[in-house]
Amino acid sequence: MRKLSSLATMATLAGLVVIGPVPSASAAAAAATCRDNYDGATAGWMYAYDKANCEGYLGGAQLDDNNWGNSLGGFQGSDDNKATSIINKGEYSQVKFYNYTRPHGDDLNPHICLTRAEGFASNLSDDYWEGLKLFGTVNNSISAHQWVDTTSCSALAE
Ligand SMILES: [Ca+2]
Ligand SMILES: [Ca+2]
């Protein structure tokens, strides 16, 4: 353990030396944003995070996941009702997020969509299911997602 931690320290110091001469770049890296996560994401995938600005990775998926709380798919267990920021790097679709696990009767399952053009939503605290406050905030309440075409959504996350 000691050896490992001293190696880690050396690696950290080496890293500091490398970025040391570029203070503006390291300062920019310190501010959390979804932009770097989006840029580093795999094309065709969506991702969700526990905290705002794509901090606290929860999971990612190339396919649908109808239940973020089960033990299958890109989102499992405690991922349910936890997402605060989301990314869509799909190649042609938008991602439809649901308040309840599916199947639920999708007409009765409040949704919000994130388009590929939007790319990411950094903080879901100001996004509401169906775009209406009466349905409650999307923050910490996503329980399923599905890839859909551009005409399948009435409310979009921003
Ligand atoms: Ca799942
Ligand atoms: Ca939910």
Image: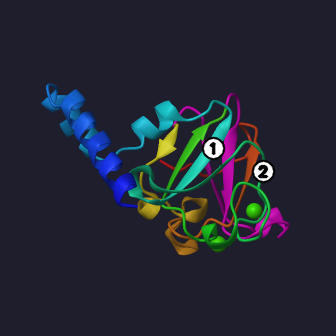
Hey, what amino acid is under mark 1?
Met
* Picture disc at residue 23: none
Residue 139 lies, with reference to residue 60, above or below; the image says: below
Describe residue 84's horizontal placement relative to residue 99 as left or right. Answer: left
Hey, what amino acid is under mark 2?
Asp
Residue that appears at 77% across and 56% down: 73
Residue that appears at 68% across and 33% down: 44
Say which element carries label 2: loop
Q: Where is residue 87 in the image (x, y as percent from the top left)?
A: 55, 44
Residue positioned most to the front: 3
Say which element carries label 1: strand
Residue 108 among those drawn in magenta: yes
Choose the circle earlier in sequence order: 1 or 2. Answer: 1
- Verify CB contact (< 8 Å) between mark 1 and mark 2: no
Q: Position of residue 119 (x, y in %)?
A: 52, 37
The residues bearing labels 1 and 2 have C-alpha atoms spaced at a distance of 10 Å
Describe residue 122's horizontal placement relative to residue 107 as left or right. Answer: left
Residue 18 lies, with reference to residue 74, above or below; the image says: above
Q: Position of residue 75 (x, y in %)?
A: 68, 60
Residue that appears at 14% across and 31% down: 23
Residue 57 lies, with reference to residue 142, above or below; the image says: above
The local crowd at label 1, few if under 14, some if 14 to 19, many if 20 or more residues have their Cα within 10 Å, is many
Q: Where is residue 129 in the image (x, y as percent from the top left)?
A: 58, 64
The local crowd at label 2, few if under 14, some if 14 to 19, many if 20 or more residues have their Cα within 10 Å, is some
Read off the residue under disc 2. Answer: 64
Which portion, as a residue range, is magenta?
91-118
Where on the image, by quarter, is ligand 2? Answer: bottom right
Residue 41 among those drawn in magenta: no
* Picture disc at residue 46: 1
When asked about the image quadrant of residue 36, the answer is top left
Describe residue 109's horizontal placement relative to residue 89 as left or right. Answer: right
